[in-house]
Image (cartoon, coloured by chain):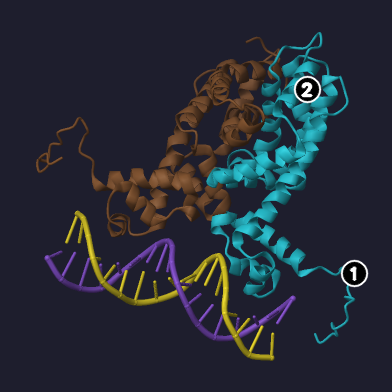
Chain colours: A brown, B cyan, C yellow, D purple
Amino acid sequence: MNRLKSSKYVDDAEEERSPETVILEAAKKVFIRKGYDGARMQEIADEAGMNKSLLHYYFRSKEQLFNKIFREMLMFVWPKVEATIFRESSDIRHVVKSLIQTYTLLVRQRPYVFMFILEEIGRHPERIQQLKSLIDDWGVKPQHIIKSIDKKLKTKHIHHIDARELIINIISLCVFPMIAQPVAMLFLWPDRKEFEKFMQRRSEHVYMAMCNILKIKS
Amino acid sequence: MNRLKSSKYVDDAEEERSPETVILEAAKKVFIRKGYDGARMQEIADEAGMNKSLLHYYFRSKEQLFNKIFREMLMFVWPKVEATIFRESSDIRHVVKSLIQTYTLLVRQRPYVFMFILEEIGRHPERIQQLKSLIDDWGVKPQHIIKSIDKKLKTKHIHHIDARELIINIISLCVFPMIAQPVAMLFLWPDRKEFEKFMQRRSEHVYMAMCNILKIKS
DNA sequence: GTCTATACGGTGATAGAC
DNA sequence: GTCTATCACCGTATAGAC
């Protein structure tokens, strides 16, 4: 265990990671596990394998460290959703399908993001400001989202439904099962494998459900 | 402001409330607002208008005080849901309708319960045990729930769907919009009144959606 | 940049007077 | 039962040596 490590080039395939990166990754893990209030700077330091005071050296305070991670999470979610909603297709089926695929993918890639964001905004309502200013920076107008979808819903042979309702239905069906996983597994999927199978097929099932709601052929 | 209050009979219409009750109500408010980790015994004492050490006198510890409230929340939700699922009706439409009404009512009566339960179980996974033992005490077998619904789904002219999927779809559509309220209001219902109107009609809309999913007439 | 030591305000919980 | 005082510890943050 006395391998030379003085070289800047690490011998493992592992790439060189800056202390900032190591801290951010450790902090992310701990904040996701414990939430802002439950997280401890000491635990983050342990997770990062470094001294507690270094966290303050690089990020000044717990709040600032948290905000970096919170912002990163928001930016991970939003662009993909936005891109889907404003997607260049006049066919509502395509929009519905990509919305569903986007959300189910996000949920499978980062099962914790939605719960984390909703929790932290609920516990610390000031944080809604971060999301607000992020949206402003992006130049997105919520009304545009609604109008964009609404226009596409004005097609013949489609059951009339409010655009906002359509959107919240899709998000509910895709995101909630993962949020409710611990309780859902107790009541409905006592076998973990069964739950995973269910989540794998979620995208198709939600699409079929939405087609039925809109009374269109899949 | 020097009204005599020495009498046991309070002059207002307000009824006599035991210290235990006052503490529990205050604690509930604070725990809902801040979560277990964010809540402070001092804040609960302030909210209850009494000395901090009285909280320990009546409930010994923060954990025990919390558990009382957590258990109360679980017992508020579960019996109503269970009663609906095992309800004496062979018609799946009745079961679906009462499930939807039960959940939308719960969500409107206590907008915080579901988020609170899911949050606290997620942050402190040990607490799933409380739910487990509560279910055991009740003598409920999850498989029975599924089978009960599944049997009712074996009717002609109904689109085949897995019972567990049906249940999670209903809960998702009813519960998630309230859980996501802060973010949903930012993107989709910038006007609070509009959101309330939406939630008022939620029960009917979800019922219509479920009828379409099952391909039955409402 | 990284460490040790420490300041400083909480935070849950208890002892003991009344 | 209710209060004050206080304990023992924790948690963020900083000072200062190296």
| B141 relative to A25 in the view: left or right | right
The residue where tag 1 is placed is B13
CA distance for labels 2 and 1: 47 Å
Residue B71 x %, y %: 70, 49
Which amino acid is tagged 2? Ser
Chain label for disc 1: B
Residue depicted at 54% across the width and 22% down the height:
A193
The residue where tag 2 is placed is B148
Residue depicted at 66% across the width and 16% down the height:
A211
Position of residue B148 relative to residue B56, above or below, is above
Place residue A186 in its image quadrant. top right
Element under disc 2: helix
Between B111 and B123, the residue placed more toward the observer is B123
Query: Which comes before the other along the chain, label 2 or label 1?
Result: 1
Element under disc 1: loop
Between A143 and B176, the residue placed more toward the observer is B176
Which amino acid is tagged 1? Ala
Position of residue A115 relative to residue B213, above or below, is below
